[in-house]
Amino acid sequence: MSGDEETWKEFREAVNMTPGELEEWLETEQSKSVGQKSGDGESTGHASGRRIVGVARTQKDDLEQADYEHMRKVVGYFTGTSHSDRPVTSGTRTGATR
């Protein structure tokens, strides 16, 4: 199985909401009120959630390398690993992956 095929499989297993369910949750005050905010006021995780919705709605054959890179970040977040092998310390990842 190729790296992208494995990433696709792991991403589909890690993301346990449909794009519609995730999109609906992203509109809640709870989802908007947590996380580290960027300059535009949206948290890193919230922006990632919107990206997950887009990736999940994209046909597999239409995915680009940047989509697979984001999918690897998502899988790494859920599994505590990373495609760049960043160390995990005290239950949180170092670096700007969240």
Image (cartoon, helix red, strand yellow):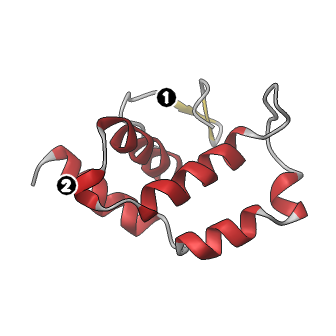
Give the residue pinned by disc 2: 5
Residue type pointed to by label 1: Pro
In front: label 2 or label 1: 2
Find residue 90 and report its image quarter: top right
Residue type pointed to by label 2: Glu
User: In the image, what residue occupies the spot 63% across and 43% down?
Assistant: 91
Q: Where is residue 85 in the image (x, y as percent from the top left)?
A: 39, 29
The quadrant of the image that shows the N terminus is bottom left
Find residue 11 and report its image quarter: bottom left
Q: In this view, does 41 lie above or below 48?
A: above
Give the residue pinned by disc 1: 87
The quadrant of the image that shows the C terminus is top right
User: In the image, what residue occupies the spot 80% across and 36% down?
Assistant: 36
Q: Cα distance, mark 2 to mark 1?
A: 25 Å
In the visual, does 21 lie left or right of 7? right
In the visual, does 50 lie left or right of 79? right
Q: Residues within 10 Å of mark 1 (few under 14, many from 20)?
A: few
Q: Is residue 26 above or below residue 71?
A: below
